[in-house]
Amino acid sequence: MAEYQPGVCNIGANQRRARRLSAIASFAVAVGLALAVAVGAVPNLSLWATIPFIFGGYVGAFQDYFRFCVAFGALARYDLSGSGGERGSVDTSEAVRADRRKAAKILLFAAAGTVVTSGIGYVAVTAL
């Protein structure tokens, strides 16, 4: 049975699966857009449209990996119901602070991944 741990784990198996699938879908859309630019089907400027999908893909992937939902962390909630745990609200200020720090870290990791991936992708696609 999974248990809520402030700043460490706030989602269970079902929530992780949803975030994993969201990441896969987001990355697939980004790759599809990049391929459309690479083959000349759409203008190079369309590469900008990949950025939100890359960012969303990283957010979903990092939430799955870290077993931590950014939105739940910001809203002081948890949902471990898919792993034999329960749903609820975070009740101590220390736990809320730890959760919000973890949420901010995940968003920073996703932003960094987006910048690197977008840069590499831009160079690769426009070089073709």
Image (cartoon, helix red, strand yellow):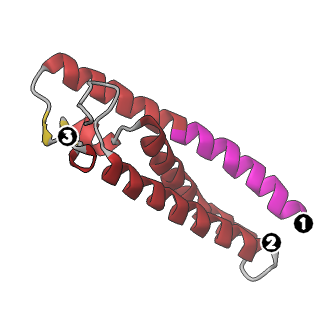
Magenta span: predominant SS is helix
Residue drawn where x is 38% and y is 49% of the image: 16
Looking at the rendered structure, which numbered label has been put on residue 128? 1
The residues bearing labels 2 and 3 have C-alpha atoms spaced at a distance of 46 Å
Three-letter code, disc 1: Leu
Residue 7 percent coordinates (x, y): 32, 25
Find out whether the residues at labels 2 and 3 contact each other: C-beta distance under 8 Å.
no
Q: Secondary structure at mark 3?
A: loop
Q: Quadrant of residue 71?
A: top left
Residue 30 belongs to magenta span: no
Q: Secondary structure at mark 2?
A: helix
Residue 120 belongs to magenta span: yes
Quick check: 31 left or right of 76?
Answer: right
Three-letter code, disc 2: Ala
Three-letter code, disc 3: Gly
Residue 48 percent coordinates (x, y): 62, 62
84 or 35: nearer the viewer? 84
The residue pinned by badge 2 equals: 38
Residue 22 percent coordinates (x, y): 45, 60
Residue positioned most to the right = 128
Residue drawn where x is 50% and y is 47% of the image: 61
Q: Which residues are magenta?
A: 110-128
The residue pinned by badge 3 equals: 85
The residues bearing labels 2 and 1 have C-alpha atoms spaced at a distance of 7 Å
Residue 94 percent coordinates (x, y): 20, 16
Quick check: 62 left or right of 70?
Answer: right
Give whichever of discs 2 and 3 has the lower sequence position: 2
Q: Taking 34 as reference, is 15 above or below it?
A: above
Give whichever of discs 2 and 1 has the lower sequence position: 2
Mark 2 vs mark 3: give the one in front.
3
